[in-house]
Amino acid sequence: KAGVTQTPRYLIKTRGQQVTLSCSPISGHRSVSWYQQTPGQGLQFLFEYFSETQRNKGNFPGRFSGRQFSNSRSEMNVSTLELGDSALYLCASSLTGVDNEQFFGPGTRLTVL
Amino acid sequence: LAKTTQPISMDSYEGQEVNITCSHNNIATNDYITWYQQFPSQGPRFIIQGYKTKVTNEVASLFIPADRKSSTLSLPRVSLSDTAVYYCLVPERGYSGGGADGLTFGKGTHLIIQP
C-alpha cells in the first residue's frame, strides 16, 4: 500500500511569489491535513480537508489556502510569500480525520529568499 | 481549547525504560490521546492512542489515570534508534465547533538515548 506522497520535495522561491504544494493521500483516505513545521514554532496545524470540503482551519493568515479534489488529492497554496514562510510543509492523511491515526508524507521543504 | 504540556527534552540509556508524561488538563470527555514520533527530516509517525487506563502495542504502552488530565508514554528497553521527538496530542476544539478542529503538535519532547 503506497504511503502519502508530496511534491515537490524541495522548493526555493523569492518573496512575493506564490507556491502550490501537492499531496496524494493513501488510497481510501478521505481526510487530508496540512501542517507547517519550523524550528521556532514547532509543528502547527494549517487546515484539514475531507471529501473536498475544508472542515477545519488553524490560525494562519488567508495567504494560506488549499483545496481537495474528488480523488482526495490535495493542494496547498501560499500567496505573497514572506521570509517567515520558509518551513517544512507536511501533509497527512487519515480515514476519518485528525483525531484518528494520521499518516504523514515526507514533506516539502520550502525556502523563501 | 485543549492544550498539552510535556518536557522539552529527556535523556536515557540503551536498555532502559523511558516514561514521558504529558499533561492535558482541559481534555474533553470524548477525546482520545495520541502520541507520535518524529525523526529528523521525516514526517511524524503514529505510536499509540488511548482513551483511559492502559493501552499497549508492539512498541509502547500508554497509561492514562482516571481523571485523564495526564498520560504517560512508556517505551520499554529503548535503543539508540529511539532518539527522536515525541508528541502528545489531544484534539483542538473551538475554531468551528463540532468535531476535532485540528491538532496542535507543539514542540514535543526531544528524547536522546545514549549508549
Image: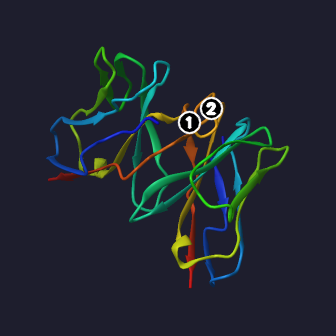
Query: Who's the residue at 62% across and 83% down the image?
Result: A15
Q: Which mark is residue A104?
A: none
Task: Confirm whether residue B35 shows in the render.
Answer: yes
The kind of residue on which mark 1 rests is: Gly
Query: Who's the residue at 63% across and 34% down the image?
Result: A97
Residue at the disc numbered 2? B97
Q: Horizontally, is B8 left or right of A55 in the view?
A: left
Task: Confirm whether residue A2 shows in the render.
Answer: no
Residue A103 quadrant: top right
Q: Residues within 10 Å of mark 2 (few under 14, many from 20)?
A: few
Compared with A79, B60 (above or below) is above
- How is the model colour-coded? rainbow
Compared with B105, B73 (above or below) is above
**x, y percent for residue A74:** 74, 52
Q: Nearer the viewer, residue B60 or B6?
A: B6
Q: Horizontally, is A71 left or right of B105 in the view?
A: right
Residue A48 quadrant: top right
Image marks 2 and 1: residues in contact by CB distance under 8 Å: yes
The kind of residue on which mark 2 rests is: Gly
Labels 2 and 1 within one chain: yes
**Marks 2 and 1, how far apart at CA:** 5 Å
Compared with B100, A39 (above or below) is below
Query: Who's the residue at 70% across and 37% down the image?
Result: A29
Residue at the disc numbered 1? B94
Query: Who's the residue at 58% across and 49% down the image?
Result: A58
Chain under label 2?
B
**x, y percent for residue A109:** 55, 69
Chain under label 1?
B
At mark 2, the secondary structure is loop
Q: Nearer the viewer, residue A83 or B76?
A: A83
At mark 1, the secondary structure is loop
